[in-house]
Amino acid sequence: MRSILVLNGPNLNLLGTRQPEVYGSVTLDMIEGMCVEHAMTLGIQVVCQQSNHEGVLIDAIHAAKGNHQGIILNAGAYTHTSIALMDALASVELPCVEVHLSNIHSREDFRHVSYVSKIAIGQICGLGPQGYTMAISALISHLEEPG
Ligand code: DQA
């Protein structure tokens, strides 16, 4: 069975209470539940992981090779700063879809830069929690028909 890693970065464990005017009221647990349910309808497996630590996220990306066929990544603020995360994604050569709950392009200038985008097959942002399920569908389509 195909397996996808859904990886969330710093501060996303606080969803539900963190700046609800920006990120909404849905918790990370609820988002992960949506991902698991959506994956079931597609006949695939998802494994969800979250960390506030850059090195732990890098280790999770390394460990994905051989265990998962692709990665859904919301790297939080590391999106805009982490060359190390970008290098990890490039190293494992797994297709990655980048997700953001908010529309990073309509926010502060520093959020317009994404190192993840340089490696990701695509980016979904500004659509809230449903961005994750859309990303899973997009990744599965890509795995079935790359290009
Ligand atoms: C975010 C956007 C980032 O700029 C921010 O640092 C986050 C969340 C989003 O999901 O909208 O932590 O990735």
Image (cartoon, rainbow, N blue to C red):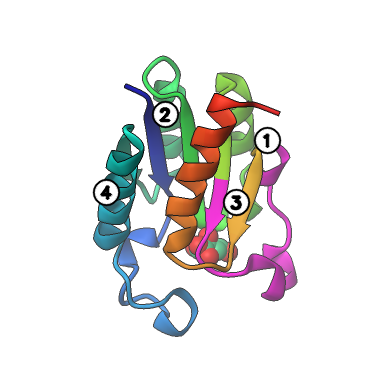
Question: Up-down: is 108 above or below 94?
Answer: below
Comes first in the chain, label 3 or label 4: 4
Q: CA distance from mark 3 to mark 4?
A: 26 Å
Identify the residue position indicated by label 1 in the image: 119
> Quarter-wise, where is residue 39 in the image?
top left
Q: Amino acid at mark 1?
A: Ile
Q: Nearer the viewer, mark 3 or mark 4?
A: 4
Q: Residue at x 40, y 61 (%)?
A: 11
Callouts 3 and 4 close, C-beta under 8 Å: no
Task: Say whether residue 60 is visible.
Answer: yes
CB at disc 3 and ligand 1 closer than 8 Å: yes
Q: Amino acid at mark 4?
A: Glu
Q: Amino acid at mark 2?
A: Asp
Residue 116 part of the magenta-drawn span: yes
Q: What's the magenta region? A: 98-119
Residue 132 vs residue 140, the one in the foreground: 140
Quadrant in which the C terminus is drawn: top right
Identify the residue position indicated by label 2 in the image: 59
Q: Nearer the viewer, mark 1 or mark 3?
A: 1
Secondary structure of the residue carrying tag 4 is helix
Across and down, in percent, residue 90 comes to: 64, 26
Q: Residue at x 39, y 35 (%)?
A: 5
Residue 131 vs residue 77, the one in the foreground: 131
